Image: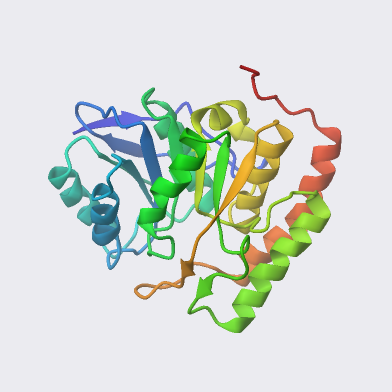
Amino acid sequence: MRSLSDSKEIMPEHPEKMIDRTSVTLPEKGSVADSVVIIPTYNERENIAAIIDAVQALPVPFDIIIVDDASPDGTAAIVREKQAQYPDRIYLHERSGKLGLGTAYIEGFRIALKNPSHKYIFEMDADFSHNPSDLTRLREVCADGDADMAVGSRYVSGVNVVNWPMGRVLMSYFASKYVRAITGLKIHDTTAGFVCYRREVLETIPLDSIRFKGYAFQIEMKLTAKNCGFKIQEVPIIFVNRILGTSKMSSSIFGEAMLGVIRLRLDSLFRKFPQKKQS
């Protein structure tokens, strides 16, 4: 393995804050897989080995980028064992602490874009709330269809959520309704975190300008992609609440989203966005 310092690629979590960067452990030879899934982790030792195995068992080759926020439970050590098991497939980016979901994905995007083979770049949770087998369905929509961004949606065909408390289901469902009303997004699941991007989307979006870190990060990425002229398509999935480990969702993250969408809407009215290149 070799280490790569990314000190020049510092992204503000918010305009007034700068994040801490550490190092990335990359496969020695590099991969030629055209798909890569980014999985942020914090205390996921109970899930991480199984989720890596499940992704590697898919019929389509996937690279995996694990962005670990200094998990005290030893998640990163398990990932290093998996790197030995799956040579040239697993990237490990270890950060110095909990720096936010949004910054984890932004750093993961940058790592993914370093490999020119990566045409399809995914977001996915580590806890099996997103079924790894659905990765190929999202990929198909972007690879074989005309979508630039595929969203694994809990709400496009009803409410497909298993083992969530009713209060949380209602909060999530009506949050998406609220976001649609404020932003004009024609997406049923605006806070979804199971996403496939064509490479061109992440090359076009000014990643340094993405400011939010939780629910609002997911909304901001979708709204920015739309404002850049990209087509977003929802794919129905069944979302299953985690069985092992502890949820990282908090009321403060949810509150950030509800207030943040107003700011996002106002910004979108006065800001000029780079546009999708016409083929």
Q: Can see residue 20? A: no
Image point (55%, 82%), residue name: 165
Number of marks drawn: 0
For this orientation, the residue located farthest to the top is 279
Seen from the viewer's position, the closer of residues 93 and 62 is: 62
In the rendered image of this protein, does residue 142 appear above or below residue 191? above
Seen from the viewer's position, the closer of residues 70 and 153 is: 153
Seen from the viewer's position, the closer of residues 198 and 85 is: 198
- Location of residue 78 in the rendering, given as x and y in whole percent from the top left corner: 21, 56
**The quarter of the displayed image where residue 200 is located:** top right
In the rendered image of this protein, does residue 39 appear above or below residue 238? above
For this orientation, the residue located farthest to the left is 85
Seen from the viewer's position, the closer of residues 69 and 232 is: 232
Query: Please, which colouring scheme is shown?
Result: rainbow
- Location of residue 198 in the rendering, given as x and y in whole percent from the top left corner: 51, 33
- Location of residue 116 in the rendering, given as x and y in whole percent from the top left corner: 39, 22
Image point (49%, 45%), residue name: 105
Q: Can see residue 193? A: yes
Query: Horizontal placement of 57 versus 205: left or right?
Result: left
